[in-house]
Amino acid sequence: MAEPPSYPRKPRPNRSPRLRCGPQHRPPPCRRVPRIMETRDMADLPFRGWRVAWAAFIVAAFGWGVGFYGPPVFLFAVQESRGWSIALVSAAVTSHFLLGAVVVANLPKIHARFGLVLITRLGGCLAGLGVLGWALAAEPWQLFAATLVSGAGWAMTGGAAINAMVSPWFQRLRPAALGTAYNGASIGGVVFSPLWVALIGLLGFSGAAALIGVAMAMALWWIAGRYFAKGPAAFGQVPDGEAGPPPGARIEPIHAALPGRALWGNRRFATLALATSLGLFAQIGLIAHLVSLLAGPVGAQNAGFGAGLATVCAVIGRTGLGWLLSKGGDRRVAAAANSLVQVAGSLAFLASGGTDVPLLLLGIVLFGLGLGNATSLAPMIAQRDFSAADTGRVVALVTACSQAAYAFAPAAFGLLRGVEPGWFFGAAALIQVAAAVVILAGRRASYASASLTSGKTR
């Protein structure tokens, strides 16, 4: 039977699909692509580390402005308003620093347990509440209770905390980054010391404490959440913003980890802690009396300018040395040289006899150039001389030891000044010489950050 002939089909007209409104026919919801991924990969973002360093700069400005440069102003305000003895209020200042040292010594454990963001926020709140406690204290015991709070706030926003914020983002450039962040401490002194005096005169101690305390708490709350919540890996970045090691390579530190009490028996640690404590003891003992020493020969107003000049020199010295060490160099030798520069400044003060203005200016410049590095060099040396696992703990313990030492420096130098003015500057020079000798006694082969060994595993 023959098949029927086939005819070509006529093309069907284009028809719009019939719309169906049932829930089973609705398209699945669209997932919004994060805006940052719509344009480029996270790894292509600008390096975030320098933003973190500048955020730490602001934390340092508040931390030092309230927790370090504030207590000398608070001492005068409390003594004037309450009529308590200078010895009593001075003991409260010492208590503030000693109690802060206890918290600093345990700061790595606190960060590991609660996180950097929460502790930074808590530090801002405690610092403000502690200062308000100083202002509202009606009895001596209340003043000392307030030092518990203010000391903890200072510890959570001080030197060891700044190192914890910056270190994850930098390896080779860490000296420069730390120098940038620690410059906030110097700016804090420039801004907050006169600001405290002006606000206390305008609003009273309690009003000034409430205003600055709220500002600090709010600023640190936002900064911590914005910049300290994530490390480089979360943004697809690596420290320094540079390419990582080749595939299969491992970074093997020269120095083995020193867990538990092994750290305390290590020569590198002992010399670093002792040298830093000696340097800061001499430095803070002299700076605490600098304005009153200069007021006689140059007048009170010019004495204030002299203190400002020392701060400017501190920023210059810290920034310059930070970038220099980022290119390489022995950091312990740099620390010894820094101490010797301050020795020269102390001897210029001594040679001035307290009256020769050019020599006094020379002393301010030389002593000021080394002023900032006493704080920032210890973390730089710790990075080279200890394993990555130990660096944070070393910085915290060195900071705690030096803070416990310099808490007594203003009183000790005040006694020397009362006995013989020449002893004052001579003691500062001798202590700085001792610091230089001690830091060199712990010198070891340069850590060189790390050695790259391709294909090796441990």
Image (spheres, grey):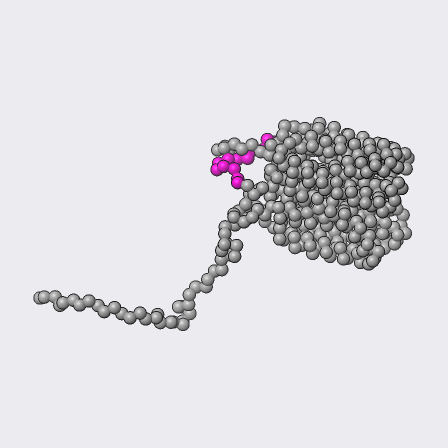
The relative height of residue 244 versus residue 143 in the rendered view (above or below) is above
Residue that protrudes farthest toward the left in the picture: 1
Is residue 192 in view? yes
Q: Which span is picked out in magenta?
A: 243-258
Which residue sits at x=79%, y=49%?
Answer: 193
Residue 30 shown left or right of residue 433 in the figure: left
Which residue sits at x=84%, y=45%?
Answer: 302
Which residue sits at x=53%, y=33%?
Answer: 452
* Residue closer to the observer: 405 or 144: 405
Residue 159, by quadrant, is top right
User: Split into 4 quadrants, where in the image is the N terminus?
Assistant: bottom left
Is residue 150 in view? no
Can you give x and y, in whole percent of width and height, for residue 243 in the image?
53, 40
Residue 1 shown left or right of residue 148 in the figure: left
- Number of marks in the image? 0
Residue that protrudes farthest toward the front in the picture: 358
* Residue closer to the observer: 260 or 410: 410
Residue 248 on the magenta span: yes
Which residue sits at x=66%, y=41%?
Answer: 178
Can you give x and y, in whole percent of width and height, for residue 152 in the image?
73, 48
Can you give x and y, in whole percent of width and height, for residue 424 in the image?
85, 35
Q: Could you tell me what secondary structure mostly forms the magenta stretch?
A: loop
Can you give x and y, in whole percent of width and height, for residue 449 in the image?
60, 34
Residue 5, by quadrant, is bottom left
